[in-house]
Image: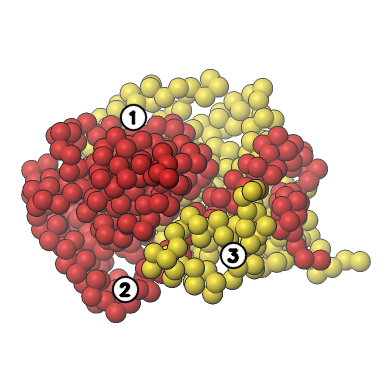
Chain colours: A red, B yellow
């Protein structure tokens, strides 16, 4: 018997834009059907290449993603874009205003664009992003571009499950080597120096390359620096070429399987974490009881560690005596 | 009977630097004693004021924190500094090189400085930071300055449990309003425009104030913009004054109790999340079995949602039939 969800999943696989949109909404709203659809679609995934693009606000990431998407479309590749804003947990709505720029693609059925922002429990955004990437993969999108604002742990959580991570920088972001330190060097597979027609670009470029010398190679890959002026479409072809080189490099690597297992291990851990909280707090304990406990802690009648031990014990996960 | 931990906790309360240091290390290394000490110390907490300081790399946060600490010390207030680097999950060690600048305080027993970086499960850093802040509180530090790099979700998780959050900006960080959007507006109680002697500062200041007009007031508080040149100690007194104004404003607010309960609610949820993973994966399932499951998912023999459902069922937390 063919169910409603079977049909829906079939439409997603066929690339039906409305079916995909509804499925992303179901993912975002944590509807039960989202998991059913994703489970049905999972066997058909594993073909897309996911590119994570991160960098500080104002570096021109959105424009770069837009140009990269156009490049792939000209190359007859289908594209999915997920624009994530993890730095805005309090608004509940995507505030990436410049999605307007993407309107040029609006009539192209080979490209699917979606903005996402945080809702619910912490970590929910990264999960929704991963689910959406899987969905686009099953829907036949060949290149999935995951754009995220900023360079903190939240962003790293989002891009670390991509196949290739691009860090976007620009001249004048703190004029010294300082600004290059914080975590960026470790996550970038490719570095883009955007707005590279600006003053100070050469100096910044040199400093960047000098620092990259110090980063240990990952299995023979030395992260390149690509200079772009996204607004003028300069350097975008070279960026696409470097992405292909990176892809080819790691597709041939001997530890490809090990990397895939470790990818799924982390994926499972993150989903498990979210589900555990749903079960133990959302279903078993309840918000009201949590409020009561929090009040006791605020009044110093209970300590928070003891409170958590109590909750664990109630869930049958207490310390062994 | 007085135990080893009782003595240790007593030494922490007395402000003994070595006892505090050892306790922070125990927190970082997730030693069992850390929780025992924190539980003993908890009733003596609740007196410190926690100031979170965040902003993009290169904005001069460390220097600002250094000057603010000196200001408080001149005022006879004891100070704790926690410098957190959440953007570096792959190094395992703090890379905030400029802690060297803090050496001026090295002989002052009224100030305690500690750098922290990510280890273990995601989210562990925010928890360790919160535990360390509690410890410093119990040790009698009156002002606790929590400095964190970047403006993403990881940083927000760290600073959102502070009493007052300062966002540090500087002229030239993306020269347009764009760079001010991403989440910063919602988390800042006070905005600092550092390096405000630079070109473009006036224009940036104006844009910042224009945008702040659009942010809804929180209980009658309008986030001020303080212009500083931290390297020359300019504007630091004014910043300290604004922090005091903010503190007074919310100490008198009618919903103080509600805010404290909500603070502890979130605290408990985050600790619970970490403990749940430790129990269900670390103790019950085991790394090896997790690897086996991840391999099956990588080979598309199992889907990740089904895998998580299985793990939940084994932990006695499965779906009701």
Residue at the location (59% across, 71% down)? Answer: B286
Q: Quadrant of residue B205?
A: top left
Task: Give the spatial CA distance, label 1 vs label 3.
Answer: 46 Å
Task: Give the spatial CA distance, label 3 vs label 2.
Answer: 25 Å
According to the image, label 1 marks what residue? Answer: B208
According to the image, label 2 marks what residue? Answer: A256
Residue at the location (55% across, 72% down)? Answer: B289
Q: Position of residue A84 (x, y in %)?
A: 34, 43
According to the image, label 3 marks what residue? Answer: B281
Give the answer, above or below, for where B104 lies relative to B150. below
Q: Chain of mark 3?
A: B
> Would residue B169 be visible to someone looking at this image?
no
Q: How dense is the environment of label 2, judged by Cα within 10 Å: few (below 14), some, or many (20 and up)?
A: few
Q: How dense is the environment of label 1, judged by Cα within 10 Å: few (below 14), some, or many (20 and up)?
A: many
**Which residue is situated farthest in the bottom direction here?**
A254
- The answer as to whether the residues below labels 1 and 2 share one chain is no
Secondary-structure class at tag 2: helix
- The answer as to whether the residues below labels 1 and 3 share one chain is yes
Q: Chain of mark 2?
A: A
Q: Quadrant of residue B25?
A: bottom right
Residue at the location (51% across, 39% down)? Answer: A120
Q: Position of residue A58 (x, y in %)?
A: 26, 41
User: Observer-nearest residue: A249 or A301?
Assistant: A249
User: Observer-nearest residue: B226 or B321?
Assistant: B321
Please state, as top left, top right, bottom left or bottom right, where the C terminus of chain A lies in the image.
bottom right
User: Observer-nearest residue: B286 or B131?
Assistant: B286
* Circle number at residue A44: none
Q: Chain of mark 1?
A: B
Chain-order first, disc 1 or disc 3: 1
Q: Are marks 1 and 2 in contact (CB under 8 Å)?
A: no
Give the answer, above or below, for where B214 lies relative to A286. above
Secondary-structure class at tag 1: helix
């Amino acid at each position: 018997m063919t169910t409603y969800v079977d049909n829906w999943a079939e439409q997603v696989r066929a690339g039906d834009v409305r079916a995909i949109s509804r499925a992303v909404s179901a993912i975002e709203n944590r509807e039960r059907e989202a998991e059913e659809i994703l489970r049905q679609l999972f066997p058909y995934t594993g073909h897309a290449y996911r590119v994570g693009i991160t960098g500080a606000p104002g570096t021109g990431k959105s424009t770069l993603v837009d140009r990269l998407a156009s490049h792939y479309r000209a190359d007859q590749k289908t594209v999915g874009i997920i624009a994530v804003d993890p730095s805005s947990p309090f608004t509940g709505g995507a505030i990436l205003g410049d999605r307007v720029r993407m309107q040029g693609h609006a009539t192209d059925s080979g490209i699917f664009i979606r903005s996402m922002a945080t809702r619910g429990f912490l970590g929910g955004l990264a999960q929704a992003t991963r689910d959406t990437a899987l969905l686009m993969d099953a829907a036949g999108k060949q290149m999935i571009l995951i754009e995220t604002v900023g360079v903190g742990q939240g962003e790293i959580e989002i891009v670390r499950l991509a196949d290739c991570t691009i860090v976007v920088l620009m001249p004048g972001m703190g004029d010294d080597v300082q600004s290059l330190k914080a975590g960026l060097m470790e996550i970038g597979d490719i570095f883009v120096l955007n707005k590279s027609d600006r003053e100070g670009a050469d100096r910044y470029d040199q400093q960047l390359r000098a620092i990259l010398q110090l980063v240990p190679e990952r299995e023979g890959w030395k992260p390149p620096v690509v200079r772009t002026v996204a607004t003028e479409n300069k350097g975008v072809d070279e960026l696409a070429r470097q992405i292909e080189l990176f892809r080819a490099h790691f597709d041939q690597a001997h530890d490809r399987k090990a990397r895939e297992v470790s990818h799924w291990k982390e994926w499972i851990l993150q989903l498990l974490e979210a589900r555990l909280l749903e079960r133990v707090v959302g279903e078993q304990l309840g918000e009201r009881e949590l409020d009561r406990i929090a009040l006791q802690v605020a009044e110093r009648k209970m300590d928070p560690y003891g409170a958590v031990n109590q909750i664990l014990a109630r869930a049958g996960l207490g310390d062994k005596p």
